[in-house]
Amino acid sequence: QVQLVESGGGLVQPGGSLRLSCAASGMVFISYTMGWYRQAPGKQRELVASITGGGITYYADSVKGRFTISRDNAKNTVTLQMNSLKPEDTAVYYCRGSGPYNYWGQGTQVTVSS
């Protein structure tokens, strides 16, 4: 059974940092492009960043230069380091594995507020 379990969300002040982690199990991890998506209230879910099994990354324009995605194929984990957070980054963040099949994690709340 495939599981994607996110952790690391929380409340942070504007300008602060958070580190999200996603632990995958039950899948051939390196075969999957791993992505972080987010969904704010009343908005559609959007892709924030992704990384292929070989390490090629993509970032949405809104997070370029502030967020960094990385993965550890030996530990089956993908991480999103978020710096210089803004109130508009507030959302539920989801981990997604895209490959032979597509899988989603349960989401973790990130709130940026003073």
Image: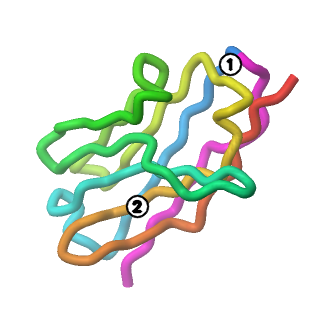
Amino acid bearing label 1: Gly
* Region of the chain picked out in magenta, as a range: 1-14
Question: The C terminus lies in which quarter of the figure?
Answer: top right
Q: Is residue 89 left or right of residue 38?
A: right
Residue 10 lies, in percent from the top left, at 73, 41
Question: The N terminus lies in which quarter of the figure?
Answer: bottom left
User: Gap in Å between the C-alphas at discs 2 and 1?
Assistant: 24 Å
Would you say residue 6 sits in the magenta stretch?
A: yes
Amino acid bearing label 2: Arg
Furthest residue toward left:
54
Residue 76 lies, in percent from the top left, at 31, 55
90 vs 98: above or below: above
Q: Which residue is mark 1?
A: 16
Q: Which residue is mark 2?
A: 96
Report which quarter residue 2 is drawn in.
bottom left
The residue drawn where x is 40% and y is 61% is 96
Mark 2, residues whose alpha carbon is within 10 Å: few (<14), some, or many (≥20)?
many
Q: Is residue 40 left or right of residue 22?
A: right
